[in-house]
Structure formats: C-alpha cells, structure tokens
C-alpha cells in the first residue's frame, strides 16, 4: 500500500489540500480550497458510514474528503471564518468548536453527501466555545468537554447538547484538555492542572501547579503525563 503525507494549506490565497508520496515527494492529488481563508485546524481521519473520511474545519466551512483521492464527501458552510481546534468524533457525531470572529459549537452527522448545512447539524450553541483549545470526549462518547480560551469549562451531553455544567477553571487556556483512565486533565496558561471526571456533576478531584506558565497541551503515555512549560519538560507518573 502506498504511504502518503497529507497536508492542507488554508491561507489568504490559493488554499489547497495535497497528498504527497512519502518516499518521493511526488504530488498524488491536489484539491483547491475555494474560500481562500486562513485556518489552523489539524484534520481527523476515521472510518465512518462505510467511507474513509478526512474531516477538517477551516476556510469558511467544515468538510469531509476521501484521503485516497481528494474527492469531497460533504461540506457544511461556516459557521465562521477561522478555525484552530481539531474536530472530535464519538462514533456517531462529529463535534467542532470555533472560532473567529464568531464562536460556535456544532454536533454534525457525518453521513451526508454534498452540502449538508441545512440537514446535518444535530445541535449547536454559541456559549462557552473555544477558539484555540480542542475539545475531548469521554471514553464512552457520552460526554463532550472543552475549556474556552477565557478559562470557562463545560460538559455537554454529546447526543442532545444539554449542558450539564459550566464553570471557571482558570484565568486563560491555550492548551487542550486530555483524557486518561477516565479522568480529564485541564491545564491553564498559569501551569495549574485541574483533574475532573466527565460526569453530569462538576467536581475537581485533584489540582497540580507546575509553578510556571504552560501553553502546550500535555501528552500521556504508559502511565506518565508530560508537560512542556516555559522553562522545563516534566514527566509525572506513579
């Protein structure tokens, strides 16, 4: 099987998606992004509805492409101009949070074709949205969680969009929350990590202060959590 590198170039010019042969650098396919608007979203690739879908938000839309050919499966117009946070998928719905200049959270059915703007949005809200931090889902896909840039965290019922709680966790967030062993880790810009369990009731179980600012999302591997703060790289484990 041919190994490819996928790259998107959403900017204020001739934007595109491109697939390159990893060995030779040869262009396999290149698809134009017609709206020519900058965005910074990393896509996700999932097997959904019998299709391999590469889903990304950016360039004034949310869209799904076939990563083998560059053909677009479906597109949803907007809901805003610029995107940073990556989508997440719980096996039924795709969730996005954005953006600039307007803020939105959308839950989208990813089984459509063509333009699905008026047919495939399951729920949406404009409160507590994040621009930079990406959201997460609980392991069972039941809860959708995120922290806004301004430090407000929320937990939603992923299916209905009901907000279970909305609470301030910190002064500001640049990092994305992460999930491990059923717990969600939220690290604010001042280096304080609040640890919650995705649930209908808000409760902070633990809190840890690195003592210096942290703007990079933590990473978790083999029982350790890694933080890159302004002056140090930390590994914390049992």
Image (cartoon, rainbow, N blue to C red):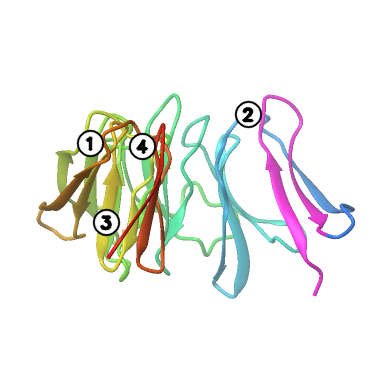
Camera-nearest label, 1 or 2? 1
Q: Are marks 3 and 4 in contact (CB under 8 Å)?
A: no
Report crowding for label 3: few under 14, some 14 to 19, many 20 or more residues within 10 A (C-alpha): many
As helix, strand or loop, the secondary structure at mark 2 comes to loop
Q: Are marks 3 and 1 in contact (CB under 8 Å)?
A: no
Is residue 231 found inside the magenta-colored segment of the image?
no
Q: Distance between the Cα atoms at labels 2 and 4?
A: 19 Å
- 18 relative position to 87: left or right: right
- Residue 105 x, y percent position in the rendering: 36, 43
As helix, strand or loop, the secondary structure at mark 4 comes to loop
Residue at image mark 1: 152
Q: Nearer the viewer, residue 84 or 98?
A: 84
- Residue 99 x, y percent position in the rendering: 44, 33
Report crowding for label 1: few under 14, some 14 to 19, many 20 or more residues within 10 A (C-alpha): many
Residue at image mark 4: 130
Task: Using the rendered image of the protein, determine whether residue 160 is visible from the camera's viewpoint.
Answer: no
**Mark found first going from the N terminus, 3 or 1:** 1
Residue, x 28% and y 31% (percent of image)? 190
Residue at image mark 3: 184
Q: Which quadrant, please, contains the N terminus?
A: bottom right
Q: Distance between the Cα atoms at labels 4 and 1?
A: 9 Å
**Mark found first going from the N terminus, 1 or 2:** 2
Region of the chain picked out in magenta, as a range: 1-22
Q: Quadrant of residue 126?
A: top left
Camera-nearest label, 3 or 1? 3
> In this rendering, is residue 7 above or below 229?
below
């Amino acid at each position: 099987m041919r190994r490819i590198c996928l790259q998107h170039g959403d900017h204020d010019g001739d934007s595109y998606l491109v697939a390159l042969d990893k060995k030779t650098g040869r262009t396999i396919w290149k698809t134009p992004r017609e709206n020519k608007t900058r965005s910074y979203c990393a896509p996700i690739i999932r097997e959904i509805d019998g299709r391999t879908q590469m889903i990304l938000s950016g360039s004034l839309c949310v869209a799904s492409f076939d990563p083998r050919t560059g053909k677009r499966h479906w597109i949803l117009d907007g809901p805003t101009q610029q995107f940073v946070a990556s989508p997440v998928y719980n096996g039924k719905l795709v969730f996005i949070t954005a953006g600039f200049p307007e803020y939105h959270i959308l839950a989208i059915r990813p089984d459509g074709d063509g333009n699905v703007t008026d047919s495939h949005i399951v729920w949406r809200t404009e409160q507590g949205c994040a621009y930079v931090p990406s959201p997460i889902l609980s392991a069972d896909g039941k809860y959708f969680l995120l922290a806004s840039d301004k430090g407000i965290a929320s937990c939603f019922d992923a299916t209905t969009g009901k907000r279970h709680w909305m609470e301030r966790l910190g002064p500001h967030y640049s990092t994305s929350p992460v999930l491990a062993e059923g717990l969600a880790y939220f690290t604010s810009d001042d280096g304080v990590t609040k640890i919650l369990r995705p649930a209908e009731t808000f409760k902070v179980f633990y809190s840890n202060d690195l003592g210096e600012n942290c703007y990079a999302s933590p990473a978790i591997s083999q029982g350790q959590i890694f933080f890159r703060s302004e002056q140090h790289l930390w590994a914390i484990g049992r």
